[in-house]
Amino acid sequence: MTEPNIIAIDGPAASGKSTLAIHLANWLDYLYFDTGIMYRTVTLAALRAGIDIENEAEITGLANRITIDVKSPTPGSGRTYDVTLDGLDVTDEIRTAAVDANVSPVSAYGGVRKAMTEKQRAIGSRGKVVMVGRDIGTVVFPEADLKLYLVASVEERARRRHQELLASGESPDYQKIAESMRKRDDIDSHRSIAPLKPADDAHIINTDHLSIEQVFEQVKALIR
Ligand code: DC
């Protein structure tokens, strides 16, 4: 395969998409773009504004009004990127449990998806990009040159998220994480617009028993 211009990586939460995407983007010197950030930022904006999460019309209006920016990380922060909402940093806040619990319903709204998909296409169509999400290979860039779809059991994914939170000094509850993941998987894969599913031409990789290095090697072999 010649070097793919757009690489789409989809799959459920904590299936290893972001880690793989960062490795690939560094290796190819491509832009890494995580589209989940956008849905998370809309959700945070709605929570901050006190909008009922079931109020589709208001949340859609908000999604069209706010400015979401993803920039190079603050030096020394250890982050992969900085995210701003209307100019103010929200990089850490979009990862809280409150956002986790509300992001799936927000991302199921057609108007929200339309607004975010347009922004994602504008960013990705410049090329040399590794874009991560749920619908990149099916809806955002169905013409992507390389599509990867990562899967892993909910137990393994919850274990990974639990480890990450422990490492960042929190005291997470494994059962709660697993339950929240099951709920998100269910909503993300059963929504009517752009549900989580592999594109027909996606390479499906089960990461349950693979280290990140092994996944990365598999994908490098595909590209070579
Ligand atoms: O990848 P993540 O966990 O940060 O994504 C947060 C939520 O955003 C996820 O539950 C579903 C939604 N999402 C989406 O619907 N489409 C995308 N392309 C990316 C994320």
Image (spheres, rainbow, N blue to C red):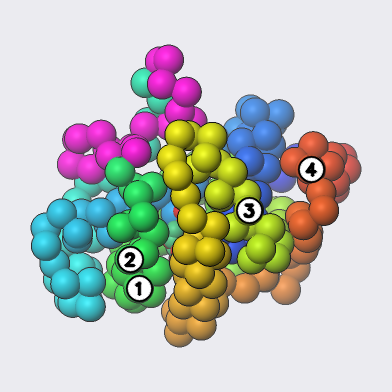
Mark closer to the observer (2, 3)? 3
The residue under label 4 is: 211
Q: Which mark is residue 45?
A: none
The residue under label 2 is: 102
- Helix, strand or loop status at disc 3: helix
For the residues labelled 1 and 2, the Cα–Cα distance comes to: 6 Å
- Helix, strand or loop status at disc 2: helix
Locate residue 141: give its quadrant: bottom right
The location of residue 61, given as percent across then percent down, is 16, 66
Q: Earlier in the sequence, mark 2 or mark 3?
A: 2
Q: Earlier in the sequence, mark 1 or mark 4?
A: 1
The residue sitting at 36% across, 55% down in the picture is: 97
Q: Amino acid at mark 4?
A: Ser
Of 73 and 138, nearer the camera is: 73
Which part of the image, by quadrant, shows the C terminus? top right
Mark closer to the observer (3, 1)? 3
Q: Residues within 10 Å of mark 1 (few under 14, many from 20)?
A: some
Determine if the C-beta at disc 1 is less than 8 A from ligand 1: no
Q: Amino acid at mark 3?
A: Arg
The residue under label 3 is: 159
Q: Which residues are magenta?
A: 75-92
